[in-house]
Amino acid sequence: MLTSFIQLLRSTLSNPDQFVTIDQEFQVLKQYVEIQKYRYSDQLEVIFECDDQVLNKKIPKLLIQPLLENAIFHGVEFKKEDGLVIITARLSGENVIVTVEDNGVGIAPETLEQINRGERLSDKAHVGIVNVKERIQLNFGEAYGMEIESIQWHGTKIILTFPAIE
């Protein structure tokens, strides 16, 4: 666990660039998952699926980590059965589509509506989600962003869309 923690710190602190490749971001996420597996043991599985043509596309540093963290801490942690998070990155035309999907407890419909309207919530559980959407739009414009699909007690799927840049 200590080795994973040190590698996670190195990768997040050593690179001063605002943007990293999706491959680099996925490596950071894998280190983060290794640390979380010590906490959740065999009750957590995280699957990474990434098309080869998006590995070198650039995204804002630490863009996906808050979504993974929310999926674990506010989604699958409260389930009685094992938690599953699937993170995918695919090319769609001139855009990159990243999804973070979990089989957790989902988001209440009224909270989901507030998030989708871009409202700031006092609930700490959703601050990271709102920040991710804002970071995408600040870096790439209003045409890009985030969509959330969630069914309470059945899971959440967050879809990020941003331009494919190298």
Image: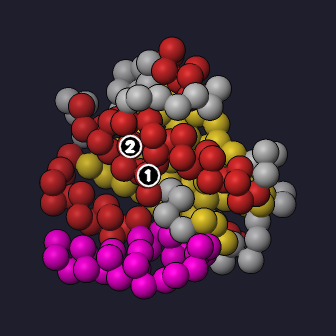
Q: Magenta stretch?
A: 1-28
Q: Residue 14: image x %, image y %?
A: 42, 85
Q: Quadrant of the N terminus?
A: bottom left
Occupied quadrant, residue 147? top right
Q: Secondary structure at mark 1?
A: helix
Residue 103 visible, this angle: no
Q: In the figure, 129 relative to 10: above or below?
A: above
Contact between marks 1 and 2 (CB within 8 A): the answer is yes
Q: Residue 98: image x %, image y %?
A: 61, 53
Disc 1 packing (10 Å; few <14; some 14–19; many ≥20) = some
Q: Disc 1 to disc 2, how far (Cα)?
A: 6 Å
**Pointer 1 residue:** 66
Q: In the figure, 73 relative to 68: above or below?
A: above
Residue type beneath disc 1: Pro
Outermost residue toward the top in this view: 110
Q: Residue 132: image x %, image y %?
A: 56, 49
Occupied quadrant, residue 125? top left
Residue type beneath disc 2: Asn
Disc 2 packing (10 Å; few <14; some 14–19; many ≥20) = many
**Pointer 2 residue:** 70
Q: In the figure, 117 relative to 16: above or below?
A: above
Q: Secondary structure at mark 2?
A: helix
Relative placement, left or right, of 102 versus 44 is right
